[in-house]
């Protein structure tokens, strides 16, 4: 696959995941105070599935986000350290006028 196609597919998957997360959250919020009919309550079953979906995404994202954030933090620190040690002083950067 080409790089642009990979980006498009990635954005579609991201949008689908956000739709599922937001949809589950909205359903839980909207039906939090429903009138339960008893043992075979359809709303309670749907609420249970929404909770399970959110827990699954929460656990998966926590396991993924932590290493990524640590890697980004290390990259920023390494970048700052390498920039501070990379100062070159030359005659041109010091704007020294060379006269004969």
Image (cartoon, grey):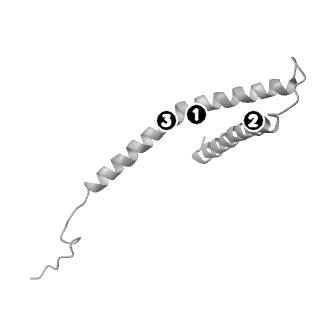
Quick one: label 1, few (<14), some, or many (20+) residues within 10 Å?
few
Where residue 83 sits in the image (x, y, percent)?
Answer: 31, 55
Distance between the Cα atoms at labels 1 and 2? 16 Å
SS category of the residue bearing label 1: helix
Q: Quadrant of residue 51?
A: top right
SS category of the residue bearing label 2: helix
Q: According to the image, label 1 marks what residue?
A: 61
Q: On the picture, is 76 further left or further right than 18?
A: left
> Of residues 80 and 32, which is closer to you in this image?
32
Distance between the Cα atoms at labels 3 and 1? 8 Å
Q: On the picture, is 85 further left or further right than 99?
A: right
Q: According to the image, label 2 marks what residue?
A: 24
Residue 42's place in the image compared with 25, above or below, is above
Q: Residue furthest right?
A: 37
Q: Which mark is residue 28?
A: none
Q: Pick whichever of labels 1 and 2 is earlier in the sequence.
A: 2
Q: Pick whichever of labels 3 and 1 is earlier in the sequence.
A: 1
């Amino acid at each position: 696959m080409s790089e642009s196609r990979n980006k498009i597919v990635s954005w579609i998957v991201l949008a689908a995941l956000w739709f599922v997360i937001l949809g589950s959250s909205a359903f839980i919020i909207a039906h939090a105070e429903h009138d339960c009919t008893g043992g075979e309550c359809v709303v309670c079953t749907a609420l249970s599935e929404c909770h399970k979906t959110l827990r699954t995404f929460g656990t998966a994202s926590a396991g993924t986000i932590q290493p990524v954030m640590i890697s980004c933090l290390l990259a920023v620190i390494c970048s700052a350290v390498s920039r501070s040690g990379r100062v070159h002083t030359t005659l041109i950067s010091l704007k020294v006028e060379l006269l004969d």
